[in-house]
Amino acid sequence: MTITITAFESSPDRGRGLARDMRVRWALEEAGQPYAVRLVSFKAMKEPAHLSRHPFGQIPTYEEGDLVLFESGAIIFHIAERHAGLLPENADARARAIAWMFAALNTVEPPIVERSMATLIERDKSWYDERLPMLDDHVRVRLGELSKRLGDADWLDGGFSAGDLLMVTVLRRLEGSGLVEEYPNLAAYVARGEARPAYQRAFADQLAVFTDNPSSSR
Ligand code: GTB
């Protein structure tokens, strides 16, 4: 059955792979599943056809036959449940990998998104220069904790899992801030994720959307 996902027609990140379709593309590549991409404009995302797929009018979505999913975490969990390579077979190890998926999305991503949104929409506000260091420190708290837990391991809990896939994509959102580089083991962890062949294929595919039509980027 053909899998179709949605992605930005004109990604504001200009092909840096920071939007959340990247994590779904990466998971599908790790699982060895071919997929089609429906590109959506910012206008189309808020129109009935897309709202029927995604109640909040966002990307990514996932369609497979009659199944329509939204929320990148739910999509990746679905892929990981149905295909080998993203979750361990052992029940306890699987539960721990799922805990890391939630940790990436619920504990590490929120302060990173809050910082990222501030850099996008508050840059010209009078409070920005005072607020940014505080947002940086909130991110540093989580990065410090994550760094301690990772130690000198390659991945968060044994072999690479969907938990690592989500965590690496979440940390990538800090690209250019210098924050991840303050924790050399986290910088190496992100680089390890980015070096995976499945990541490379996913990155090249999302970049092609931008390079095929660079003038359409905002
Ligand atoms: N919780 C949802 C999920 O995990 O799927 C969040 C989905 C979401 O935020 N989607 C964003 C979206 O559709 C795109 S990824 N936004 C449009 C809207 O809400 O109207 C967020 C994103 C966008 C751009 C960059 N960037 O340019 O660097 C990075 C991340």
Image: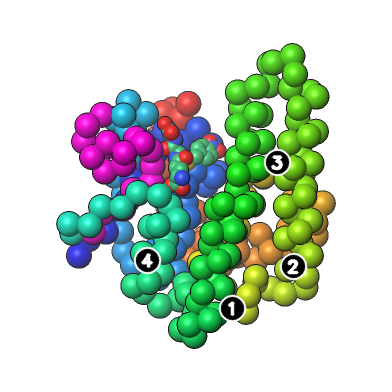
What is the C-alpha distance between the residues marked 2 and 4? 27 Å
- Secondary structure of the residue carrying tag 1 is loop
Q: Sequence order check: which comes first, mark 2 or mark 3?
A: 2
Q: Which residues are magenta?
A: 47-64
- Secondary structure of the residue carrying tag 2 is helix
The residue under the point 26% across, 29% down is: 47
The residue under the point 31% across, 41% down is: 54
Q: Alpha-carbon neighbours of circle 2 within 10 Å: few (<14), some, or many (≥20)?
A: few
What is the C-alpha distance between the residues marked 2 and 3? 24 Å
Of marks 1 and 2, the one in the foreground: 2
Q: Circle 2 is placed at which residue position?
A: 149
Q: Sequence order check: which comes first, mark 1 or mark 4?
A: 4
Q: Alpha-carbon neighbours of circle 1 within 10 Å: few (<14), some, or many (≥20)?
A: some
**Relative to residue 190, is residue 169 drawn left or right?**
left
- Secondary structure of the residue carrying tag 4 is helix
Q: Sequence order check: which comes first, mark 1 or mark 2?
A: 2
Per the rendering, the mark at residue 79 is 4
What is the C-alpha distance between the residues marked 4 and 3? 30 Å
Of marks 4 and 3, the one in the foreground: 4
Q: Sequence order check: which comes first, mark 4 or mark 3?
A: 4
Q: Alpha-carbon neighbours of circle 3 within 10 Å: few (<14), some, or many (≥20)?
A: few
Q: Sequence order check: which comes first, mark 1 or mark 3?
A: 1
The image quadrant that residue 159 belongs to is: bottom right
Does residue 61 belong to the magenta stretch?
A: yes
Per the rendering, the mark at residue 159 is 1
Q: Circle 3 is placed at which residue position?
A: 176
Q: Nearer the viewer, residue 200 or 2?
A: 2
Q: Sequence order check: which comes first, mark 2 or mark 4?
A: 4
Q: Position of residue 29 (x, y in %)?
A: 42, 65
Res 181 seen here: no
Res 124 seen here: yes
